[in-house]
C-alpha cells in the first residue's frame, strides 16, 4: 500500500488522465529526463530525503530482503512510473489503444503489483480499485 498511495500514486495522478495530459508536471518530467544541463541535474539529484523514508519503510516491511534489493526495487518502481508518463505514445501504438492512460488507478495498481512481485519473488494479483472521481 505504501508504494500505491505515496510513492507512485501522486506522480501518476498529477501527470496522467484526460485533464492532466501534458500538464506542467508531466512536461517537466519529460524535459528533465532528456536534459543533461547542470541545473536540471541538480534539481533531480538534490531532493532524495523523501526516498530515504520510503527505503526505510520498505526495510521495515520486508526485513528479510537485502537492502540493495530494496533500493533497486524502489528505483524500478519509480522508473516504471516515470517511463509511463514519458512514453505513453509508444505503448498506445504498440497496444493499438488497448492500454488506457485515462485509467490512472489501474496504471498505479499495475506498477505496484509488478514492484511487489519483484521485491517478494512471488505472484500478486492486480487489484482493481474503484475510485469515484470528483467532478
Image: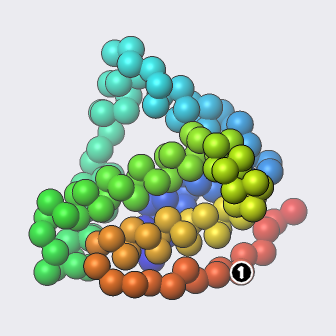
Asked whether 14 or 121 is in front, the reply is 121
Secondary structure of residue under mark 1: loop
Asked whether 12 or 52 is in front, the reply is 12
Which residue is pictured at 69% across the width and 56% down the height? Answer: 95
Which residue is pictured at 65% across the width and 80% down the height? Answer: 129
- State whether residue 128 appears in this view: yes
Relative to 14, residue 39 above or below? above
Q: How many marks?
A: 1
Relative to 49, residue 126 above or below? below
Q: Quadrant of residue 114?
A: bottom left
Q: Quadrant of residue 47?
A: top left
Left or right: where does residue 100 sit relative to residue 35?
Answer: right
Left or right: where does residue 6 sit relative to residue 69?
Answer: right
Q: Which quadrant, please, contains the N terminus?
A: bottom left
Residue 60 picture location, percent across and down: 21, 77
Asked whether 104 or 39 is in front, the reply is 104
> Badge 1: few (under 14), some or many (20 or more) residues near its Cα, within 10 Å?
few
Left or right: where does residue 93 sit relative to residue 108?
Answer: right
Q: Quadrant of residue 27?
A: top right
Q: Which residue is disc 1 drawn over?
A: 130
Q: Tell me the colour scheme of the image.
A: rainbow
Residue 38 picture location, percent across and down: 34, 15
Which residue is pictured at 53% across the width and 35% down the height? Answer: 29
Residue 120 picture location, percent across and down: 28, 79
Q: Which quadrant, please, contains the C terminus?
A: bottom right
Amino acid at each position: 500500500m505504501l508504494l500505491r498511495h505515496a510513492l507512485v500514486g501522486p506522480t501518476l495522478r498529477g501527470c496522467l488522465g484526460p485533464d492532466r495530459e501534458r500538464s506542467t508536471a508531466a512536461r517537466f518530467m519529460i524535459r528533465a529526463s532528456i536534459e543533461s544541463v547542470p541545473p536540471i541535474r541538480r534539481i533531480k539529484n538534490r531532493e532524495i530525503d523523501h526516498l530515504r523514508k520510503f527505503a526505510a519503510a520498505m526495510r521495515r516491511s520486508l526485513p528479510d530482503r537485502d537492502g540493495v534489493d530494496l533500493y533497486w526495487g524502489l528505483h524500478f518502481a519509480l522508473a516504471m512510473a516515470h517511463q509511463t508518463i514519458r512514453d505513453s505514445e509508444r505503448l498506445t501504438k504498440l497496444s493499438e489503444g488497448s492500454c488506457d492512460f485515462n485509467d490512472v488507478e489501474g496504471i498505479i495498481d499495475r506498477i505496484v503489483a509488478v514492484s511487489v512481485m519483484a521485491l517478494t519473488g512471488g505472484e500478486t494479483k492486480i487489484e482493481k480499485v474503484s475510485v469515484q472521481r470528483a467532478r
